[in-house]
Image (cartoon, helix red, strand yellow):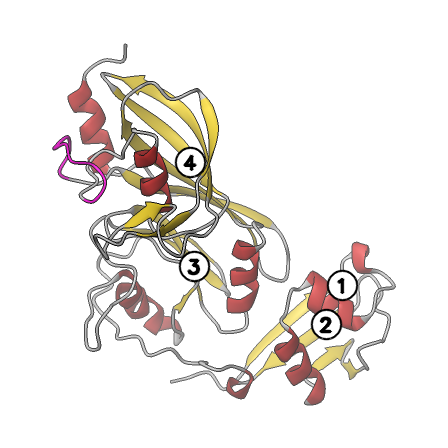
Amino acid sequence: MKNTQWVFNETVPSLMDGQSLKSLLSQYLQLPKHLVYSIRHAQRVLVNGKYQPVNFPVTTGDKIQLTFVPNDFVSPFPKVTADSAATVEILYEDANLVVMNKRRGDKTHPNQPGEFGATINHLAAYLATEKTLPYMIHRLDQETSGAIIFAKNPAVVPILVANIAQKQIKRTYLAWVVGTNLPDSGTIDFAIGLDPDDKRKRKVNGPKAVSAITHYQVLKRQSGYSLLSVELETGRTHQIRVHLAALQHPLVGDPLYNSSNDSPFLLLHSWKVDLPLPFTKVHKIVEAPIPQHFIDFQQRLGPSK
């Protein structure tokens, strides 16, 4: 059964007191122009139960009701095949979004028609009991584990996507890398493009290169390896993997950018997401537990030196 509408009841915060309804919708709630137009044109935005023009000044404590319908969205109901929910580990969930712990080795989404078994398929089965669907916000590489965000309705998708683009969502990764010679912290600012020799890979300053910025801190040095905390300022394909390989400190177990056989698994984990929740702006920090393949690797290294 599909939703025929999505209704949100919000309260005007003090910092928007005296601002126009349009400012509240577009600047504070971060709704894109086409959604603001749709709900305004159809009189589906109410202030204290009444329709008001967009230049109407709102007051702290005013009750705002927003109603969206499927026609407001290009893809209101993504085509996602539900697959067994047995592997779903929910880290955080509310009415608008879910943060789940992606398993290493699972794709984020299918690449071919009719393919299933990906993270989004498992989540679709879990959400079927709530009569809703998962909506893609961002991706993790197949061999990367950890926290990943999905929306539960189409209205919050553009908000979350904008939060990522504007760096209001902070994503922190854990990565084991080869070598111990990195400074205690640093910023890597190398443009990343295609690799003309291997379409699976990316390359620093390769064709069609775009800006890519990665921040890291060394958490531990042990037996010739380093454990890093990594934050992305941009979100390019394979960004962490390419950047650290370019510094001659490739990720442990990276099948594309590390030729040594130091682990059967890529040791890259989406550790924490810090995000402002849609509409309320309440900050939520969600942490994914350290996966077993990280624990096993560190135990094999022996005591810290």
Q: CA distance from mark 1 to mark 3?
A: 25 Å
Dot 4: what SS?
strand
Q: Position of residue 158 (x, y in %)?
A: 54, 68
Residue 260 in the image, given as x and y percentages of width and height: 14, 32
Q: To which residue does mark 2 refer?
A: 64
Q: Are marks 1 and 3 in contact (CB under 8 Å)?
A: no
Residue found at x 22% / y 36%: 292
Identify residue type, mark 1. Answer: Val
Magenta portion: prevailing SS class: loop
The residue carrying mark 3 is 98
**Earlier-in-chain disc, 2 versus 3:** 2
Which image quadrant is residue 223 in?
top left
Q: Which of disc 3 and disc 4 is earlier in sequence?
A: 3
Tag 2–tag 1 contact (CB < 8 Å): yes
Callout 3 amino acid: Val
Mark 2 neighbour density, 10 Å: few (under 14) some (14–19) many (20 or more):
many
The structure residue drawn at horizontal position 40% and vertical position 24%, both measured from the top left corner, is 218
Other-residue count near label 4 (Cα within 10 Å), few / some / many at <14 / 14–19 / ≥20 = many
Which numbered marker is on residue 230? 4
Stretch of the chain drawn in magenta: 256-264
Residues packed near mark 3 inside 10 Å, few (<14), some (14 to 19) or many (20 plus): many
**Disc nearer the start of the sequence (2/4):** 2
User: Quick one: 129 or 53, which is closer to the camera?
Assistant: 53
- Closer to us: mark 2 or mark 4? 4
The Cα atoms of the two marked residues, 2 and 1, are separated by 7 Å
Marks 2/4: CA distance?
Answer: 39 Å
Tell me which amino acid carries mark 4.
Val
Nearest the eye: 171 or 194:
194
Helix, strand or loop under label 2 = strand
Where, by quadrant of the figure, is residue 138 drawn?
A: bottom left
